[in-house]
Structure formats: C-alpha cells, structure tokens
Image (spheres, rainbow, N blue to C red):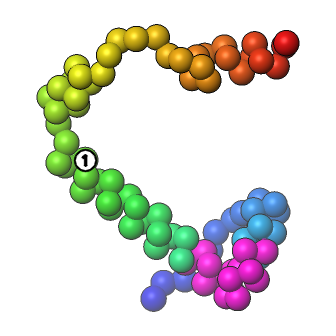
Amino acid sequence: MTTLRIELSDSHSEKLNELAVRENITPSELAAKIVREAISQAEFFDQRATRGSREKFLEAMSKVPNDPPVPPDTPYHAAAKDQG
C-alpha cells in the first residue's frame, strides 16, 4: 500500500471530516473510498467510450426533431421568470 499526502482547502478538509464522521470511518478511509470510486467511474466511462462511434452518435441525433426547446429548457426562461 502507498501513502499519499494531499493538500485540501480548509473548507474541503472540514467537509471530508464531517462526512467521515457521518459514515463512521476515518478521513483517510473516506478519501481512499472516494479515490477508488473516481477511478472506477473513469474506467467505466473509458470502457463505454470504446463501444461508441461518431457514426452511431450522428445516426441517433438524426432521429431527434429540430424543434425549439420548450420551457423550462429555453435559455432565457429562468431570467424572464426572475424579472417578472
């Protein structure tokens, strides 16, 4: 096993400690768990990416209608709602 020293902002360090207490593990164990999960996710998406292709993407996108978005997905919907 390797020991790794990392620097965190005070706020991130505090949050790590709070979460570790909540999960009843040490901050070091929680950090290791988070790293394992991040690596697992990265490997999952790397593997998924090998199955995709630009051609399949373009084929799927060709089936999506070219209609304008409907609220609340319109770009200025939230801003207009806040103003009035």
**Residue bearing the label numbered 1:** 49
Q: Position of residue 45 (x, y in %)?
A: 33, 54
Residue drawn at (76%, 83%) of the image = 21
* Residue projecting furthest to the front: 70
**Mark 1: few/some/many CA within 10 Å (<14, 14-19, 20+):** few
Rendering coords of residue 42 (x, y %): 38, 58
In the rendered view, would you say 12 is above or below 63? below
Extreme residue in the left direction: 55
- Taking depth in this image into account, of 14 and 48 the one nearest to the observer is 48
Q: What type of secondary structure mainly makes up the magenta span?
A: helix
x and y, in percent, of residue 18 in the image: 79, 74
In the image: residue 45, left or right of residue 27 = left
Is 4 in the magenta?
Answer: no
Q: Amino acid at mark 1?
A: Ala
**39 or 21: which is nearer to us?**
21
Q: Is residue 2 left or right of residue 27?
A: left
Badge 1 element: helix
79 lies above or below 12: above
Residue under the point 75% across and 13% down = 80
Magenta range is: 18-32
Query: Foreground residue, 70 or 58?
Result: 70
* Residue in the image at 66% along x and 14% along y: 76
Q: Is residue 75 above or below residue 49?
A: above
At 47% across and 64% down in the image, what residue appears? 38
Q: How many marks?
A: 1
Q: Tell me where residue 71 sits by quadrant.
A: top right
